[in-house]
Every structure is written in C-alpha cells, then in structure tokens.
Amino acid sequence: MLVHKSVNDKNVNKMNVVMVHGGVETSCAPHYIKALRESALAGYNALGRGLVDAAEEAVMILEDCPLFNAGYGSVLNMDGEVEMDASVMDGGTGKFGAVAAIGCVAHPVSVARKVLEDTPHVLLAGAGATKFARSKGFPQINCVAPGMLEAWQRATDKMSRGILPNASLFTGLPEENGIAACDTVGCVVAHNGQTAAASSTGGSFLKLPGRVGDTPLIGGGIFASGRCAVVCTGLGEAFMETLTAAYVDSLLARGIHPQEAAEKAIERLNEKRGAPGGILVADSQNRYGAAHNTRSFPVAVVLGGSLAEDFSPRKIAVSDRR
Ligand code: ASP
C-alpha cells in the first residue's frame, strides 16, 4: 500500500526528504512528535552542508533529548552502565562509520562520523571507542538519567527476588497507556539523487555488558547506497541475523517502491524471527516509506522543508505473518 499519495506515488518526487523516527514502542504523545519534528527540520536546515551532516544533525537533536533511548537518557545494561551504539552511512560514497558499546559521550553519532572521516576503520568498540572520542575532543558526559537509574534499580531489585520485571524490553520503563516511553532514533535523507543514514541507541535494557545491537552493523540495522538509505529499530539480534537493512536495498534494486520494500522487510522479519521492528527508507528519487509491526512507531517527515502532516508508517499486523 502506498501512502501520502499526492507526493509519494510519483516516480520521482522533486522535494528532498528528511525522515526521522523515535523507535518502536515509543510514545506518540505530542511532545514526542514535537521533538521528532524539530529533529527532522534541523536535519533539513543542515542539508546545505551535506546529506551526512543533515542525518547527523537530526540524530544529535534526539540524542540530546532525554525522551529517547540515545545519548543522555539511554537505557542501562545489567551492570547499571550506559553503553551506546551509533553509525552513519553516506550512500553516495558507500563510506560507513560506527561506534559500539561506547560510554560517556553526548553524541555517539558524531563520534561515528569521526570514525568515518578520520580513521581507516569503520567500527570502533568499547573502551577504544571512548578513548577515540576523547582524542577527538568529545567531553566526558554522564549519560545516566535519573529515570533510567530508577528503572534499573526497580528491575534488578525484582530480579534479585526472582521476579521478572514488568517493564519495556527496550527501556525498562513502566508502560504508560500500554506504550513504553522511549527508544532508538534514526534518520534517512534523500537529496539531489543521493542518500544518507544515521542511527543512535542505548540498545536494550539489561543487556549484557558488551552487547552490541544492529544500530552500528552495516546491512543489519542501517544501510545507504546509490539507491536508498535505510534505518531500522527493534530487536537488534533479529535485524542482524536477517540482514534486514541490506534486504531493503536489494528490494529497491529490483524496482520496488520504498513503501512496499519497508512492508516486505517487516513481513520477512515477522516470518523469520517474529520480532518487533520498524523501518524507514528514502530513495535517490526522493520517494520514501515506513512500516512496523509494533504498537507505535512515531515518525516525522520533512519534504522540501515542510512537515508532511499526514504521513504515518504502515502497521503490519503480526497475524500477517506468512
Ligand atoms: N535495535 C536496537 C538494539 O537492539 C534497539 C531498538 O532499536 O529498539 O540495540
């Protein structure tokens, strides 16, 4: 099913696209949507500097916002520490940069950008990634937000008494109106026949120290090429094992529209792993799409500098599994 017919049905949409998400199972309350819209507009305003700048800028705004599970406000691991993953990819050059299990930086996505630009590597992890960030002038920041510490204390206290915590898989927070409070963030950008993607996360609540999700893994939770840019959110292990972001790119290579590709990839994730997930795609013709199989997946889209008020990602029912 195609969405946003007036713009998105055309073979070529002339307006550039900046699309951001706040993660699956994230609240769609007005203040979440407002933050996502500000992020997408900030990305658009940075487009003059370049597509990677736009994607990075949009993600930085959300890393700064404690509503989301990225940067300050990230979830805590089993040891009560924040370990974050982030990445950027330039579809035009195929260059990729990522950090995994990095601690104590405000903007992991910007450290990932430095890996892309200033090193011969594509992925730095753990203490080495944090040390690299310091060498590039990123100050030491405490990323542990009080609400996340409380969530960790509640959950580990219950676990020590043999009770499974009744909290969001992703955030550890008690659910408000059936929806958890925050999750991973990501951005895709399409402009002048080029694409870029950026993503950032605190990962999953109570993960083992050292656990790395799909966010910094090329082809798993993020991809960009001459065809399209893709970012994913959801159960990272499922996205890694199914190489979902690369699969979306392969669908576009077969001429499939980004909206249909996002839907097919979520259906495939259902079929192969039965895992929660959400996907954003924008292609080099400025067409775009988004799909998920969860209770909520807040997304903001800016087309040619204006918010697309009527866009919403397509929800694929879990019963649609084939
Ligand atoms: N995919 C992320 C991870 O597994 C979490 C998320 O996007 O919800 O680390």
Image: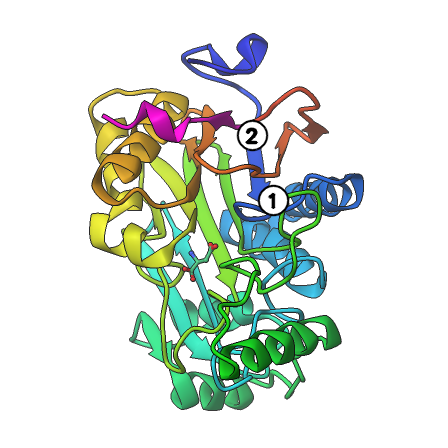
Q: Residue at x 21, y 41 (%)?
A: 272
Query: What percent of the width, then of the height, locates residue 177?
Result: 70, 43
Quadrant containing the N terminus is top left
Q: Is residue 70 above or below residue 196?
A: below
Q: Quadrant of residue 81?
A: bottom right
Q: Amino acid at mark 1?
A: Leu
Is residue 249 visible from the viewing direction of this image? Answer: no
SS for tag 2? loop
Along the viewing direction, whichever of 239 and 104 lies nearer the viewer: 239
- Using the image, tell me which numbered label, if any, was put on residue 47: 1
Does residue 321 belong to the magenta stretch?
Answer: yes
Q: Position of residue 43 (x, y in %)?
A: 64, 46
> Is 291 rendered above or below residue 203?
above
Image location of residue 60, percent across then percent down:
63, 61
Residue extent of the magenta highlight: 313-322
Q: Give the vertical position of 306 relative to 186 (above or below).
A: above
Ligand 1's quadrant: bottom left
Residue indicated by mark 2: 16
Q: Residue at x 53, y 71 (%)?
A: 108
Queried on whether the Cβ of the residue with tag 2 lies below 8 angstroms from ligand 1, the answer reads no
Label 2 neighbour load within 10 Å: few <14, some 14-19, many 20+? many
Q: How many marks?
A: 2
Is residue 136 covered in magenta?
Answer: no
Is the residue marked by circle 1 packed among few (<14), some (14-19), or many (20+) residues within 10 Å? many
Q: Which mark is residue 198?
A: none
